[in-house]
Image: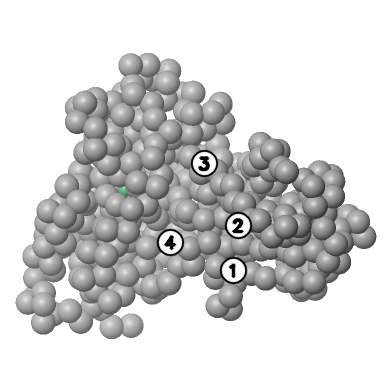
Amino acid sequence: MAERLILHIDMDCFFAAVEQRDNPELRGKPVIVGGLSSRGVVSTASYEARKYGVHSAMPMALAKRKCPQGIFLTGNYPQYKAVSAQIFEIMSRFSPLVEPLSIDEGFLDITGMERFIKGNPRNYGMKLKQAVLKETGLIASVGIAPNKFLAKLASDLEKPDGLVIIRQEDIQRILWPLPIARIWGVGKKTEERLAAFGYRYIGDIARAGKDVLQKQVGERLARHLVELANGKDDRPVEPVRDAQSIGKETTFEENLQSRQEVEQHLLYLSAQVGWRLRRSGKNAHTVQIKIRLGDFSTYTRQKTLSDAICYDEDIFKEAKALFRAFSLPYGSGIRLLGVSCSGFDAPSEISLFEMENKQKKERLYTAIDKIKARFGEDKIAHLGESRVLKKINASLDGSEARH
Ligand SMILES: [Mg+2]
């Protein structure tokens, strides 16, 4: 493969930085944005809060213990989305190939932009940072390298306000002395596992080689680790025209008359939407239900969550709560029900605590999703199918319409 040039841009403390930009009284203070429930995790901590050891993906309860004087916010997700759109618009001026990685970071393939770069990727990265600062008032860190892994690593090396270039010949010098946790996908647990075998630095992995590592941690992880430790990563920058929402709705031949029927069907719809989210690798912050009554009056209710979700039961829990909170003028019954998710977010950092639970859930859902893929989604998860009135119209919106 010809040498590529990949740029990774990542906003510094994005949610906290937006809050501090919009609320001057928060500047210079430890601001922590995230889920404030007992199960919540920190989305973003300002640098002031990081001094107390608070970081992304940390359980909120722990963050409160570490930084009791912190300012804790659930955050203003619609505002972050708006700023994010502005940042991605700027990125699109710097490369036709932009891949959003999460709400505040993306990859740009800038290979072959020599005409504009004039042999100097650093200038290009600097121009992008300056445009973001000028237009949004926010600071970004940028990394430029021959592939995604190294570009992402580079953007993190001199945060905040970093601009780091890693070339092929820098791999041993820059990559190998870094702790193993810097390898993409290595969390605390994998780090501890590798430490038990004496591996502490990325160079240790590269020197050990795949054969040795394979016996210790298994083939899949060994391959992943050795490739990345040698700075190899062929993943292309894949621009995705993201659907704004993924949803499913059903129109009933006979109107639903009881709460029980409605909730059964909300469960069915939640399972359909969950499957589509997982299939497209998305986590959603917003759950919406749509209700059309017998007289064709149509209502939507939605809730935006600090923690993004993708599992059936989590979607159902929110959909059901939205329905129950909605005092419905039943009368002629319900003609149409819909569930949709939006506000997608790919978590850039993985919480270890969440990971363990997630892995269990993922095994379960992978099995379910395989069956669905094999037999068709309508063959499974027809919960209480006989009691749900015959569907006369099941329409999809969002990305589904494009498949
Ligand atoms: Mg960021």
Q: With 25 as the anchor, is 39 left or right in this view?
A: right
Foreground residue among 139 and 353: 139
Q: Residue at x 24, y 73 (%)?
A: 95
Query: Quarter-wise, where is residue 17 in the image?
Result: top left
Mark nearer the viewer, 4 or 3: 3
Residue carrying label 1: 397
Q: Name the mark on residue 340.
A: 2
Quadrant of image for the C terminus: bottom right
Three-letter amino acid code at the position of disc 1? Asp
165 to 116, vertically: above or below = above
Disc 4 residue type (three-letter): Val
Residue 305, which numbered label?
3
Q: Mark 2: is the Cβ under 8 angstroms from ligand 1?
A: no
Q: CA distance from mark 2 to mark 1?
A: 9 Å
Label 2: how many residues lie within 10 Å, few (<14), some (14-19) or many (20+)? Answer: many
Contact? badges 2 and 1 (CB < 8 Å)? yes
Q: Earlier in the sequence, mark 3 or mark 2?
A: 3
Instruction: Residue at 77% x, 54% y: name it.
Output: 334
**Quick check: can you spot residue 179?**
yes
Residue under numbered circle 4: 226
Mark earlier in primary sequence (4, 1): 4
Residue 27 x %, y %: 20, 29
Q: Tag 1, which secondary structure?
A: strand
**Is 334 placed left or right of 185 in the picture?**
right
What residue is rendered at 73% in x and 64% in y?
A: 250
Q: From the viewer's perspective, is the residue at label 2 or at label 4 nearer?
A: 2
In terms of sequence position, does the residue under pointer 3 or pointer 1 come before the other?
3
Q: Does the residue tagged 1 have its C-beta within 8 Å of any atom of ligand 1?
A: no
Q: Nearer the viewer, residue 302 or 76?
A: 302
Quadrant for residue 89, please give it.
bottom left
